[in-house]
Amino acid sequence: FTTLMEPDTEEKKKKKMSAPKNLYPVNTLDSDIVLSEFINQQGKMISLLEDARKINLEKAKLPISIAKLIKLKPGDTFRF
């Protein structure tokens, strides 16, 4: 998944991926709300990364939001 999000290079052109329609952003956004939510999510990410120090990132598995049956390693989830 994460390599699909890397930028194109001259040697390697990637297929474009589109998000599921229910995950498309809305056209009208309030920048103050968006920025506040982004800062809040960054705080949560820092907390999750600190918690991840206590587990084996190669053995644990986490379900992804778009398909609960697919499980990824925490390290791969953070990269994504």
Image (spheres, rainbow, N blue to C red):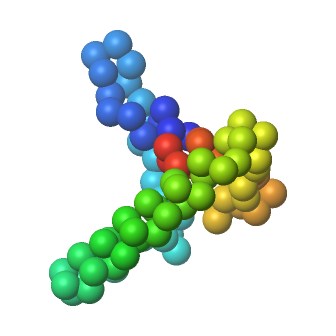
Foreground residue among 41 and 48: 48
Residue at the top extreme of this rendering: 11
- Residue 48 in the image: state x and y as whole percent: 54, 61
Residue at 32% x, 71% y is 38
Residue 52 percent across, percent down from the top left: 61, 52
Task: Tell which of 47 and 63 is nearer to you.
Answer: 47
Q: Of all residues shown, which one is farthest toward the front? A: 54
| Residue 27 appears anywhere in the view | no
Position of 48 with respect to 7 (left or right) is: right
Q: Residue at x 18, y 81 (%)?
A: 31
Q: Is residue 74 above or below residue 41?
A: above
Residue positioned 46% across, 54% down in the render: 18
Image-quadrant location for residue 6:
top left
Residue at 59 percent across and 58 percent down: it is 51
Across and down, in percent, residue 26 comes to 34, 79
The tally of labels here is 0
Q: Is residue 32 left or right of residue 73?
A: left
Q: Is residue 55 visible?
A: yes
Q: Vertical placement of 48 versus 36: above or below?
A: above
Q: Nearer the viewer, residue 42 or 6?
A: 42
Q: Quadrant of residue 27?
A: bottom left
- Residue 69 lies left or right of residue 35; in this view the side is right
Quadrant of the image occupied by residue 43: bottom left
